[in-house]
Amino acid sequence: MRFLLASVCVVASLLFLSGCEPVPSTPPLANSPTIYAFFSPGCSGCVADKALLVKLERAGYTIRRMNIAIHPEWERRYRIAMVPFYIVIRHGKVVLRTHDLNLVIRTVHNASSVQSQAAMSQLP
C-alpha cells in the first residue's frame, strides 16, 4: 500500500511540475473559500505542493493542513484515496474535491473574481 501511495505521489508531483499555475495576485475577499489540504509527511507530491500552499496562505487564503499520518481516520471520513488531496469549501458547501492544486488555484481565483465583479456591479 505504501509503495502504491509513494508511486501515486511521484506521478502527481511530476504532473504538478509540468504545468504550474501562478498564485492569484489579487487579494481574496472576506468570504473566500477555505482549502483543506490533506497530506502525508513522506509524500513527494505533498512536499512539492507545500510552496504553493504557503504562497496562497500569504496571499490571504485560508489553508487547513490535514495530516493523515497522524489522523488516518480522515481517509475514510473524507473519502481520501491518495494524497495530496484538496477539498475547497465555500459558504459551508464543498465546491471542489481534487488532487490537482492547479485546479484549486483556478477555482479560488475565479471565485474571487466573480465576487469582486458582483460587488462592483452593486455600486451606484
Image: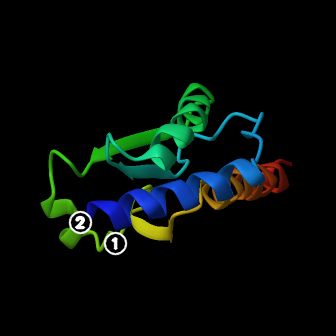
Q: Secondary structure at mark 2?
A: helix
* Residue under the image location 54 percent in, 30 percent down: 54
Residue 21 tag number: none
Q: Is residue 80 left or right of residue 58?
A: left
In terms of depth relative to the viewer, which is nearer, 5 or 102?
A: 5
Asked if disc 2 and disc 1 are in contact, CB closer than 8 Å, the reply is yes
- Image position of 94 (left or right of 16): left
One can see residue 1 in this view: yes
Q: Amino acid at mark 1?
A: Ala
Asked whether 87 or 48 is in front, the reply is 48
Q: Is residue 21 left or right of residue 105?
A: right
Percent from the top left, x then y, of residue 78?
27, 69
- Residue visible at 51% across and 36% down in the picture: 50
> What residue sits right under mark 2 in the picture?
75
Q: Can you give x and y, in whole percent of width and height, for residue 60 in the image? A: 57, 31
| Nearer-N-terminus badge (2/1) | 2
Residue with the most extreme top position: 58
Picture quadrant where residue 79 is located: bottom left
| Residue under numbered circle 1 | 81
Q: Nearest the camera: 30 or 36?
A: 36
- Residue 63: give x, y in percent of width and height: 44, 41
Residue drawn at x 33%, y 62% as measured from the top left: 3
Quarter the N terminus occupies: bottom left
The figure's colour scheme reads: rainbow
Residue at image x 47%, y 56%?
9
> How many numbered marks are there?
2
Measured as percent of width and height from the top left, residue 34 is found at 46, 49
Q: Is residue 104 above or below residue 25?
A: below
Element assignment for label 1: loop
Kind of residue at badge 2? Glu
Instruction: Decide: few, some or many residues near mark 2? Use Cα within 10 Å; few <14, some 14-19, many ≥20.
Output: some
